[in-house]
Structures are given as structure tokens and as C-alpha cells.
Amino acid sequence: MSVFSGTIFSKSLNKDTHLTVILPQDSRPHVGINGQLVNGLKPHEHPHTMILLHGATDCDSTWVRRTSLERYAELYDMAIVMPDGEMSFYNNMVYGQAFFDYVSQELPELASQLFKVAVGPEDLYVGGLSMGGYGAMLCALTYPERYRACAAFSSGADVRGARRMSMNPDLKNGMDAAMKAIFGDPLNIPDSSDLYMLADKVSTPLTVYMTCGRQDFTFESNCRLKDRLQANPNVDLEWEEWDGIHEWGFWDVSIAKFFEKYISD
């Protein structure tokens, strides 16, 4: 595999922005997820692509630094495109940039042009953790026809709950300023940013894989989103939960499970 880290210009954001990309390359023999030796792979000319989104305290390189993502991508011959979403919750911000347009529309086109990867609906996946899990679901529930599958791990599923969190005077993590920049002041969160509302409206087939740790502070909100998705006959949902909190060990296991279950030729 090859890993590239650099800067591109985004028309949607109207600025330079950072990007980390994993690209398939002729590989060496290695041990797969199941512990068996795998011969080196000859990559596809135009590999499948996953747009993989980071959490609120991370950046575009964190997935590579905190998990075995490069090894998993090599095993399944996947291109992974990781944008820097800042603290946008991957929305078009009231006081900021149009991150939703960037991630859902412009970035797949840029990836195809620059890296020659496949981004059609049979080849494009979207996924993320925490804020990035919310962002992945926002993309997939808004445009289900564009993605082969969506992966959401420990998602910040309840954006209205994040609003309540931002109003807590004891929180000093910048959430209040971020929420005001995204949704305005006073805060006005539209239905188009509410995953629960979007889950009810999916009208074309969509495959979703969700995980959340039972001790994760987002567990209850993710269970509520799971129930809404399961009630929609157009959504093919697989939900997995096990003991775990909001941390990278859980997400490393989650992304490995997703690749094993959903990535095929």
C-alpha cells in the first residue's frame, strides 16, 4: 500500500484543505485478519473507495495513526480517502465552510480525478467514528443511492443532544463555539441534519453497519437510531454491540469487522 498526505484546493470550502489517502499497490505477503498468511495482492486498476471520516478531536491522519487501517486496506484492496472535517460535524456551516457539500459531492469527484479510484454507487463506501460516524450517516441517509454501504462506529447520532451538551457550562472542549458556528446563534438545527428524521425518509435501498460499545456515552442515542433504521424497510441494517467505551481500540476492531463483512470484489 501507499500512503499520501497533502493539500488540495476545494471549491466547496473555497480554501486549501488537508487530505490523507491510502492507495492499493503491489503488496508483500502478510498475515490477514483471520491470522492466515495472505499472498501479495495485485491491485485493481480502479479500486473500491471508502471515504472515512474522523471524530471531533481528530484530523485526517488520525485513522492511520491510531489503527491498523493500512493493513486492512491492503488485505481488501481498498482505497481510503480521509478528509479533514475540522469541527464541522460535516455540515454546511452557518459561520464557516460547506463541509457537507465537500464530503458528499466534491470529494468523490476529486478522488476519481486525482487518484483514479472507482466512486460509482457499486464502489463507493462511507464511514466514520463519533462525529465522523454522524457525518457518514448524514451522507448516506441523504444520498443513499450514491453508496454501496455505510459504516458508523460510536456515532454522534443525536445532534440535538450535542446541542444540549454544548450548552453545559462545565464543558470546556469548544463544543459550544463549534455548534454555534455550524448551526448559528441562536442554534437552529434543521431536520436535514437530524439523523432520526433522515432515517424515516430513506426511500431507496441502503446498507448500514453500526457498532457501539455498551459503556459508550453514545450508546443510548445509537440504540435509538438503530431502532429508527430497523423500522425502515429500505434500510438493510446490521448492528453489533459489545463491551467497550469511546476509544480507538473499539474502532480498530469495528473497521476490521466492516471490511471482513462488506468488502468484496
Image: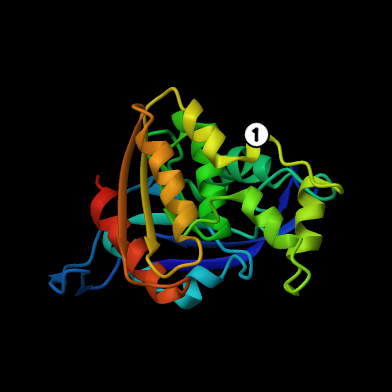
Could you tell me which quadrant the C terminus lies in? Answer: top left
Seen as rendered, the residue at the extreme left is: 36
Q: Which residue is mark 1?
A: 191
Horizontally, residue 168 falls left or right of residue 32, namely right
At a point 52% along the width and 32% down the height, the residue shown is: 143
Q: How many marks?
A: 1
- Asked if residue 187 can be seen in this view, the reply is yes
Q: Amino acid at mark 1?
A: Asp
Rendered location of residue 46, percent (x, y)? 39, 45
Q: Name the element at disc 1.
A: helix
Could you tell me which quadrant the N terminus lies in? Answer: bottom left
The quarter of the displayed image where residue 204 is located: top left
- Front position in the image: 233 or 151: 233
At a point 63% along the width and 50% down the height, the residue shown is: 159
Rendered location of residue 123, percent (x, y)? 38, 40
At a point 51% along the width and 51% down the height, the residue shown is: 115
Horizontally, residue 199 falls left or right of residue 179, namely left
- Asked if residue 88 can be seen in this view, the reply is no
Rendered location of residue 199, percent (x, y)? 48, 34
At a point 66% along the width and 43% down the height, the residue shown is: 100
Give the vertical position of 84 relative to 93 (above or below): below
Give the vertical position of 29 relative to 47 (above or below): below
Give the vertical position of 260 relative to 125 (above or below): below
- Front position in the image: 159 or 151: 159
Horizontally, residue 181 falls left or right of residue 253, namely right
